[in-house]
Image (cartoon, helix red, strand yellow):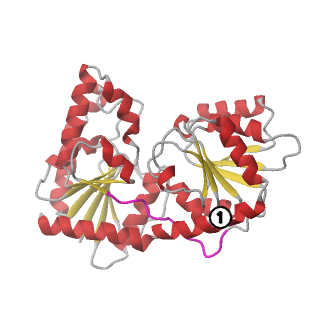
Amino acid sequence: MKIIFIIDQVYLHGGIERVLSIKANYFASKQENQVFILTSEQKNKEACYQFDNTITFKDLGINYDRRRSYFHPVNLKKLPGHIKKTKSVIKSIQPDVVVVCSHSADTYFVPFIVKSIPKVKEFHYSKFIEEGKRKNPGFLKKLFFKYADYVESKYDKLVILNKDESNYYKSDNTKVIPNPLTFYPESTSNLSNNVIITAGRIAHVKGYDILIDIWKIVATPGTNWKLHVFGDGEPGYVQELQDKINKEGLQDSILLKGSTNDIKGEMLKASIFVMTSHNECFPLVLLEAQACGLPIVSFDCPYGPRNIINKDTGILAPIYDKETFASSLTQLMNDNERIKEMGKNARENSGKYQLESIMSIWENMFNDLIINS
């Protein structure tokens, strides 16, 4: 089977890039497959995750101005070249299936080129973020949503990460395939360190500013727990968070640790994972935390955490309810037996998402699409 995965780049750390590396490596490990990764703005940089050496990379060198919308005139003038180059590569490779991974410009034209080849679109974000905009759109926005819905209907399959997301799609071509675990360590955390961990892109949507407010409630005098935040982001926003930490006098107990290539190792040294995102689709980091045997305290944000966490594996606090989140976290911090029981259950739950189980769903979907194309 020949498979093309389309993504904007693979040099920045991120959930989409990490999941792509896992899926691509899985398919490449089987001799009967040929895997290609087509990028539009790799900029001659090294991939940030490890990819099988049999995978062929092709970069189109489109290099959109990412400070602007894809529909800004500066970027729109690059679109014809992007379409032409993408079509040329697909025709030359003649893949059995094409998968669009990231939500970049190619999302909106790939279904309409080389139509005989099945096309799949992955969604790694929650469509909840569009809900408010769709209720009272302006004229241009209304046209855009109408076109986006039309484009989605032209893909052979739309892969979504949880069942709740299907409510946001107009077409009936959705298929739920959760992300696979990126690792499943032989041993789990011994849950003996007073370390709480969170990890992800340092961005407003992750709610780290809210987490600082929560930690201010939790970190009462005498509390000897530390909160470690792993991830990187726009330097100005990272500094805003650090300034807030300093202002609240929390610099000794909240540590912005930057990005790491060993998140598994850091999780294994922690005892609890926390998440305060405004919205999530299917946060892979929660599965990773569970695989390491960590209980989780998270906001019940739309719609990822509730599809991973239950009362036996963690705690879901009403979104933006800082007091309840802080109270729940404090109670867990002071109950070592509960931490251990939830950690054990979390590990068991994560087993459902091991690589072979999830990738068999992908393989079956691809085979069905190829047979029916």
Q: Which residue extends farthest top? A: 138
Q: Which quadrant of the structure image shows residue 179?
A: bottom left
Quarter containing the N terminus: bottom left
SS label for mark 1: helix
Q: Nearer the viewer, residue 248 or 70?
A: 248
Q: Which residue is mark 1?
A: 343
Q: Amino acid at mark 1?
A: Gly
Res 326 seen here = yes
122 versus 94 height, above or below: above
Membership of 286 in magenta stretch: no
Q: Nearer the viewer, residue 198 or 350?
A: 350
Residue found at x 46% / y 42%: 302
26 versus 42 height, above or below: below
Membership of 177 in magenta stretch: yes
Where residue 318 appears, as percent x and y from the top left, is 57, 40
Q: Nearer the viewer, residue 187 or 110?
A: 187
Residue found at x 27% / y 43%: 169
Where residue 94 appears, as percent x and y from the top left, is 16, 63
Where residue 271 appears, as percent x and y from the top left, is 71, 59
Residue found at x 25% / y 32%: 145
Q: Main secondary structure of the magenta part?
A: loop
Total marks placed:
1
Q: Which residue extends farthest bottom? A: 31
The reply, left or right, for residue 98 in relation to residue 116 is right
Magenta part of the chain:
176-188
Where residue 107 appears, as percent x and y from the top left, is 27, 44
Q: Residues within 10 Å of mark 1 (few under 14, many from 20)?
A: many
Residue found at x 37% / y 76%: 29
The reply, left or right, for residue 218 in relation to residue 101 is right
The reply, left or right, for residue 346 in relation to residue 14 is right
Res 65 seen here = no
Quarter containing the C terminus: bottom left
